Image (cartoon, helix red, strand yellow):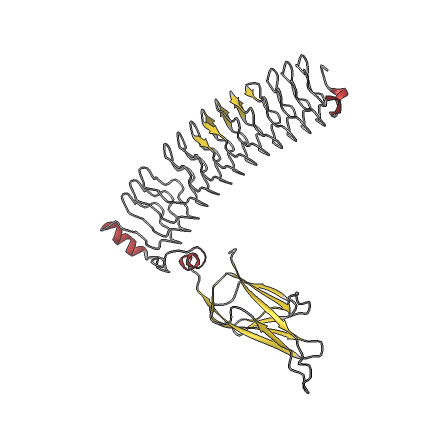
């Protein structure tokens, strides 16, 4: 777990001036002083400082009355304290051989997902700390079909019939619901993070208030759904059907959309930073001002789509098919478009700084007023291309074919690399 509980230890070495005898050196563990509670498996940081707030250079021995020695440096991170009441002691041997120490009480409790979320995520106290027994789930499914605010975390509930069941406010994290049927179910405000819903059916389900962050939604049919502004960060949506789905304003950062169907999908102001759209189909989709920075389109088929004014920096288009695409006025800097046929792509007024366009076919394209600074154009075909007012500063034009290209008012071509090998200049 990423959450760390910190203990700050201040070593106070002092002497009372004017006293006949020297006080014992002392080591004081500051906040929290008593009854600190942590969950099994959580990282606990122990740190030691001197009276000036500087890190202790000498070794400090950290020990538990249950587990023995747990560390020997001025800083110690430990996540394997046994369940129970511990007395943690920090011990330091001073330069004159004196031993100074202080202790703190820590209670390590059994970790459950509900306890973890209550401690770190403000989970409602109404949720039981422990998952409901599967036998009780079966009884509720046969009777009331009411699983509202039940703790369903960490369970294997795959291949179940949940039609018409109410999960409103239920705690469903880290569970397996794959291949289950949620048609007409009520999932309003349910917490489902890190759960597996692969191949599940959610047609006509109420999913208002749900976060799909870190959820496995692979092969789920999401056609026609309105997922505007939903959180789908890090979701696995491999093979999802997103036909005519509204994803405007949604957070799809680092989502996996490999092989997904994005035909006529609406992606206005959608954040797809670092997402993987490899081998997906994007056809007649409505895309405007979307963020595709560092996204992967490897092997994707993108046709009849408007990508103008979207962010496409550092994207990977290798082996993709681009037909009738508008990428004008777009920042494509740092992207890989090598070996692609771009003849039917609108590219004017775009930023190709540091792009890889090697072996790309750009013949007859309009690239007017674009930036090709530091762009790799080696072996690219620019025959009959419109290249008015294009900046070629430090572009690599090794064996680039410029035959009949219109270079009117372009600049810095003389500062490009491998000019002597270019064809048609």
User: Compared with residue 184, is residue 31 higher up or lower down, i.e. above or below?
Assistant: below
- Up/down of 373 relative to 9, above or below: above
Percent position (x, y) of residue 374?
Answer: 69, 29
Residue 327 in the figure: left or right of residue 208? right
* Point 23% across, 51% down: residue: 144
Q: Residue furthest top?
A: 404
Residue visible at 28% across and 52% down in the picture: 138
Q: Is residue 323 visible?
A: no
Q: Position of residue 3 (x, y in %)?
A: 51, 57
Residue 359 at x, y percent in the picture: 65, 23
Q: Is residue 200 left or right of residue 319?
A: left
Q: Looking at the image, which residue is at 71% across and 14% down? A: 424
In the orientation shown, which residue stands out farthest toward the front? 18
Q: Nearer the viewer, residue 297 or 102?
A: 102
Q: Tell me where residue 377 sits by quadrant.
A: top right
In the depicted view, which residue is nearer to us: 66 or 17?
17
Q: Is residue 358 visible?
A: yes
Against 115, residue 384 (above or below) is above
Between residues 209 and 138, which one lies in front from this camera angle?
209
Picture quarter containing residue 237?
top left
């Amino acid at each position: 777990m990423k959450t760390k509980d910190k203990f700050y230890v201040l070593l106070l070495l002092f002497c009372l001036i004017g006293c006949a005898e020297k006080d014992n050196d002392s080591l004081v563990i500051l906040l929290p002083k008593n009854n600190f509670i942590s969950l099994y498996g959580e990282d606990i940081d122990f740190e030691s400082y001197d009276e000036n707030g500087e890190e202790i250079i000498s070794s400090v021995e950290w020990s538990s009355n249950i587990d023995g020695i747990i560390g020997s440096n001025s800083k110690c991170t430990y996540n394997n304290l046994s369940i129970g009441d511990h007395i943690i002691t920090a011990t330091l041997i001073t330069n004159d051989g004196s031993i100074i120490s202080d202790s703190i009480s820590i209670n390590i409790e059994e970790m459950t997902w509900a306890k973890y979320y209550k401690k770190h995520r403000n989970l409602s106290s109404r949720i039981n700390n422990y998952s409901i027994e599967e036998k009780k789930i079966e009884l509720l499914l046969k009777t009331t079909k009411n699983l509202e605010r039940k703790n369903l975390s960490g369970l294997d509930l795959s291949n179940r019939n949940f039609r018409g069941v109410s999960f409103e406010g239920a705690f469903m994290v880290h569970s397996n619901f794959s291949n289950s049927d949620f048609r007409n179910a009520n999932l309003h405000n349910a917490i489902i993070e890190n759960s597996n819903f692969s191949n599940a059916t959610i047609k006509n389900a109420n999913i208002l208030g749900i976060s799909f962050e870190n959820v496995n939604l692979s092969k789920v049919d999401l056609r026609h759904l309105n997922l505007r502004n939903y959180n789908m960060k890090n979701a696995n949506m491999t093979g999802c059907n997103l036909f005519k789905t509204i994803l405007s304003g949604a957070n799809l950062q680092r989502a996996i959309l490999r092989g997904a169907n994005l035909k006529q999908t609406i992606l206005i102001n959608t954040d797809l930073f670092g997402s993987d759209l490899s081998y997906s189909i994007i056809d007649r989709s409505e895309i405007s001002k979307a963020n595709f920075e560092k996204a992967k389109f490897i092997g994707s088929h993108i046709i009849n789509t408007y990508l103008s004014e979207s962010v496409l920096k550092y994207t990977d288009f290798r082996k993709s098919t681009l037909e009738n695409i508008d990428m004008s006025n777009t920042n494509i800097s740092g992207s890989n478009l090598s070996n692609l046929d771009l003849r039917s792509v609108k590219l004017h007024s775009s930023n190709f700084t540091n792009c890889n366009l090697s072996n790309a076919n750009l013949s007859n394209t309009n690239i007017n007023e674009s930036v090709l600074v530091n762009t790799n154009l080696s072996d690219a075909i620019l025959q009959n291309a419109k290249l008015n007012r294009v900046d070629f500063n430090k572009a690599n034009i090794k064996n680039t074919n410029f035959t009949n290209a219109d270079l009117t008012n372009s600049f810095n071509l003389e500062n490009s690399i491998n000019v002597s090998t270019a064809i048609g200049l």
